[in-house]
Amino acid sequence: MFPQMRRAAGLSAVRRAVGGVASADQHHRLFQAALFSASSYNSSSRSQWFSYNGIAGDKASRAATHAVFGTMLFSTAATSIVEEAHAKETVNFRPKEVVLYQYEACPFCNKVKAFLDYYDIPYKIVEVNPLSKKETKWSEYKKVPILMVDGEQMVDSSDIIDKLYRKINPDVSTNSAEESEEKKWRRWVDNHLVHVLSPNIYRTISEAIDSFDYITTKGNFSFMEKLSAKYAGAGAMYFISKRLKKRHNITDERAALYEAAETWVDALQGRDFLGGTKPNLADLSVFGVLKSIRYLRAGKDMVEHTRIGDWYDRMENVVGVSAGFRE
């Protein structure tokens, strides 16, 4: 993670750690002091920090030194906690070549990317043109994601994640209560959460156009394809989303999205992640799926009107910078 991003992640975590203990003004002063002490604590200043029992003899200087030294210790401890909490998983599984064939806005593709990013497995991204699909003509599988791992083709997002997880953890037990909870919520993602997304991002003609504007900007389209997809595609998906809404018994799109977000937060039961102190495969699946809509109007509304924002921020921090690259 880049230093600036790591510092931002650290501040966010420290702010949550001391939430409820100090006032907003005290928070502000505390973070300023912590940042200053952390940045100024180097080899040339150590003698000043450790002069507490020597030079600082009078009460005022003792109090001042004690306060600054305490701030330094707080900053150092907080930084250590943040580093531990937000470090990516390191694994021995290092394939020579990983290639992901995807649509940028596809929730299933984003599930796979969340897993690869969290485990810091570098992968090449090949954006598939959804109209011609020329990039995947070679495969009998006609959907995305397709993941090639050292020449082995993997398909279906959940199956891909299962296969990769077994390669990373060949001796892991699959019979624990934690595993059962994890599998339950992964099924919930595939059987419920993903079906709530389309009726929301194509809820109105305006939202459908906004969504396709994002999709065509990120996707592999020619100029003319962008124009036709943005307006014709948006119109078509607006009407298709109404059929999807009926098929999945959704009466109010936003209410269904908010309910799904709250259901997930309730499942956490106060934990940082469903996996406890670290995300498990269910956390990564929910995060990946929601990442596909996070900065569309529906995703912004979801974060504003539900409690899911804090969890999403924690996931964004721990997943970190993407391990994907484009040529």
Image (cartoon, rainbow, N blue to C red):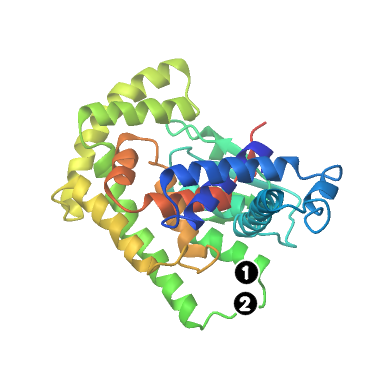
Q: In this view, does 170 lie to the left or right of 112?
A: right
Residue 93 placement (x, y as % from top left): 72, 61
Split into 4 quadrants, where in the image is the C terminus?
Answer: top right
Residue 189 pos. (x, y %): 37, 59
Of pointers 2 and 1, the one earlier in the residue sequence: 1
**Structural distance between the alpha carbons of marks 2 and 1:** 8 Å
Q: How crowded is mark 1: few (under 14 residues within 10 Å), some or many (20 or more)?
A: few
User: Circles 2 and 1: CB distance less than 8 Å?
Assistant: yes
Q: Is residue 83 left or right of residue 257?
A: right
Q: Which residue in the structure is indicated by mark 2?
A: 172
Residue 3 found in image quarter: top right
**How many neighbours does mark 2 have within 10 angstroms: few (below 14), some (14-19), or many (20 or more)?**
few
Residue ID at (31%, 55%): 261
Q: Which mark is residue 166?
A: 1
Q: Which residue is pictured at 20% across the width and 46% down the height?
A: 253
Depth order, front residue of 35/318: 35
Asked if one can make out residue 92 in the rendered structure from this viewpoint, the answer is: yes
Which residue is rendered at x = 60% and y = 59% of the image?
85
